[in-house]
Amino acid sequence: MTIDVADRIPAERLDNQHSDIFGQTPSQTVGPFFHYGLPWKGGADLVGRSDMGARAELFGEEHYVLNLSAPTGTPLGKVIEVAGRVIDGNGDPVPDAMIELWQANAAGRYRSADDRREAVPVDPHFVGFGRASTDNGGVWRFRTIRPGRVPGPDGAWQAPHLALSVFGRGLIKRLATRLYFADGEGNDTDPVLAAVPVARRGTLIAEARVGGWWLDIVLQGPGETVFFDL
């Protein structure tokens, strides 16, 4: 015998909040992503007005109408391009991940209310935040400014770096990591790098390539990237 839920619940309680209808919401991972909005058009270009960041090939032309980023001017500092691949535990590229970037400006100051250092200038034309989708080959890419050094624990200076977060299928929460530069000033004394075993520090250090810097992000297995607790 089948009993209709509507026969035993008052009409005023038949809504999408009632546990007798839907029960407990099942747990979900943080991906894959609905690409119409999370990585926005231009979200990976922190210095210009290109459409880097969104997956244009996933949209019909008539729907690819996301707003571009709107820079207010030219940021100070050296423009660089950083890129890499997201690779899963089988060594395969992850084509539906998203990378978030957060960084200081060229002078070493964050665009944040938490950074109150009056002696270090804020760049009014640089936000320091962006998002990039991976493509079918698992490649992500940003155009940005090479950051300056920022203070770390106990006043020790950190080497120039980008804070990266990885979102994707199979991940219960975002994975936080960093990108350092192979020629970065202070890499040898950076307090965060110093806390990472020597054999694994290379997973955080981007190598120079023609046109920019490259760092693969390996989610599991041999060469797994170092990820930090939030």
Image (tube, rainbow, N blue to C red):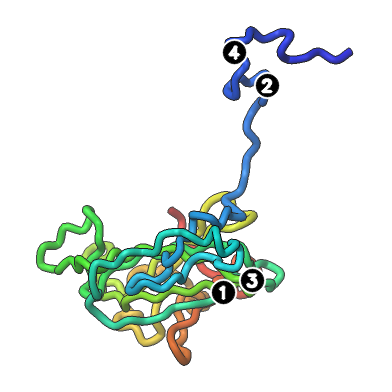
- Camera-side residue: 16 or 78? 16
Q: Which amino acid, by three-letter code, is at mark 3? A: Asn
**How far, Cα to Cα, is label 4 from label 3?**
46 Å
Residue 42 can be seen, yes or no: yes
Lateral position of residue 120 relative to residue 213, left or right = left
x%, y% of residue 157? 25, 72
The outermost residue toward the front is 62
- The disc, 1 or 4, on the residue closer to the chain's N-terminal end is 4
- The disc, 4 or 3, on the residue closer to the chain's N-terminal end is 4
Task: From the image, tell me which residue sits under label 3.
Answer: 136
Q: Secondary structure at mark 3?
A: loop
**How far, Cα to Cα, is label 1 from label 4?**
48 Å
Is the residue 205 above or below the residue 173 in the image? Answer: below
Find residue 12 and report its image quarter.
top right
Task: From the image, tell me which residue sits under label 4.
Answer: 13
Task: From the image, tell me which residue sits under label 1.
Answer: 139
Q: Residues within 10 Å of mark 3 (few under 14, many from 20)?
A: few
Task: From the image, tell me which residue sits under label 2.
Answer: 21
Name the residue: 60% across, 20% down.
Answer: 15
Q: Secondary structure at mark 1?
A: strand
Q: Which amino acid, by three-letter code, is at mark 2? A: Ile
Name the residue: 26% across, 75% down.
Answer: 148
Disc 2 to disc 1: CB gap under 8 Å: no
- The disc, 2 or 1, on the residue closer to the chain's N-terminal end is 2
**How far, Cα to Cα, is label 2 from label 1?**
42 Å
**How far, Cα to Cα, is label 2 from label 4?**
10 Å
Q: Quadrant of the image for the N terminus?
A: top right
Q: Which amino acid, by three-letter code, is at mark 4? A: Arg
x%, y% of residue 139? 56, 74
